[in-house]
Image (spheres, helix red, strand yellow):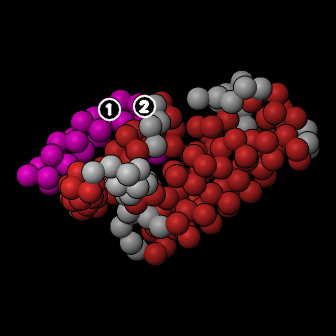
Amino acid sequence: MQIPGEEALVERARRGDAGAFEALVVAYQSVAFRTAFVIAGNAADAEEASQDAFVKAHRGLGRFRGGEAFRPWLLTIVANEARNRRRARGRRAALALRAAPEPGASGEDPEEAALAIDRRQRLLTAVERLRDDDRDVLACRYFLELSEEETASVLGIARGTVKSRTHRALGRLEEELR
């Protein structure tokens, strides 16, 4: 999903307009952090990865192809930075559900809230047991709500691979939940 006037902002940023790049950062910082969190597994790594990604994106604006969407290009950089942190620390990535609001925070029935917390924890545990590539594709598609095309760009895989990995990952998740 492009922000209004994105092409003009990118072009101005390419010409050295710091304010234009700042507007891009503001527009995409939330999705960049969420993407990094899903892949890196914790908030500190996600914050560093997203900040480093913006720095790299700024430095790489000259290589950005005009007419392309900025968001997938940026999220690819974010994902690479987050993967580097995950690999360096040797941890498994946690699920984006941890960043979601706790069930019951909206004043719902305490019994329903307790059941929702239990379901959320079961899902989180099951997803954490999946392979990294399964977790990454499910997180991008369902927790970050990225399109297949954006997911492909972020993960550096073909769109058809996104479809097949999503299908297989959902099957494995179903097995984990049994």
Q: Is residue 29 left or right of residue 88?
A: right
Q: Position of residue 136 (x, y in %)?
A: 38, 50
Q: Position of residue 94 (x, y in %)?
A: 38, 63
User: What's the mark number on residue 163?
Assistant: 1
Could you tell me which residue is drawn at 33 percent across and 49 percent down? 108
- Crowd class of label 2 (few under 14; some 14 to 19; many from 20; radius 10 Å): some
Secondary structure beneath dot 1 equals: helix
Could you tell me which residue is drawn at 66 percent across and 55 percent down? 53
Secondary structure beneath dot 2 equals: helix
Which segment is the magenta one? 155-178
| Viewer-closest of 164 and 135 | 135
Q: Is residue 59 magenta?
A: no
Q: Which of the marked residues, 1 or 2, is nearer the chain's N terminus?
A: 2
CB atoms at circles 1 and 2 under 8 Å apart? Answer: yes
Tell me which amino acid carries mark 1: Lys
Task: State whether the magenta stretch is mostly helix, strand or loop.
Answer: helix
| Viewer-closest of 43 and 48 | 43
Q: Quadrant of residue 50?
A: bottom right
Q: Position of residue 25 (x, y in %)?
A: 73, 47
Could you tell me which residue is drawn at 56 percent across and 70 percent down? 44
Q: Is residue 60 left or right of residue 83?
A: right
Please state, as top left, top right, bottom left or bottom right, where the N terminus lies in the image: top right
Tell me which amino acid carries mark 2: Glu
Q: Is residue 67 above or below residue 83?
A: above
Residue 152 visible from this viewpoint: no
Q: Is residue 172 above or below residue 129?
A: above
Read off the residue under disc 2: 148
- Crowd class of label 1 (few under 14; some 14 to 19; many from 20; radius 10 Å): some
Residue 43 visible from this viewpoint: yes
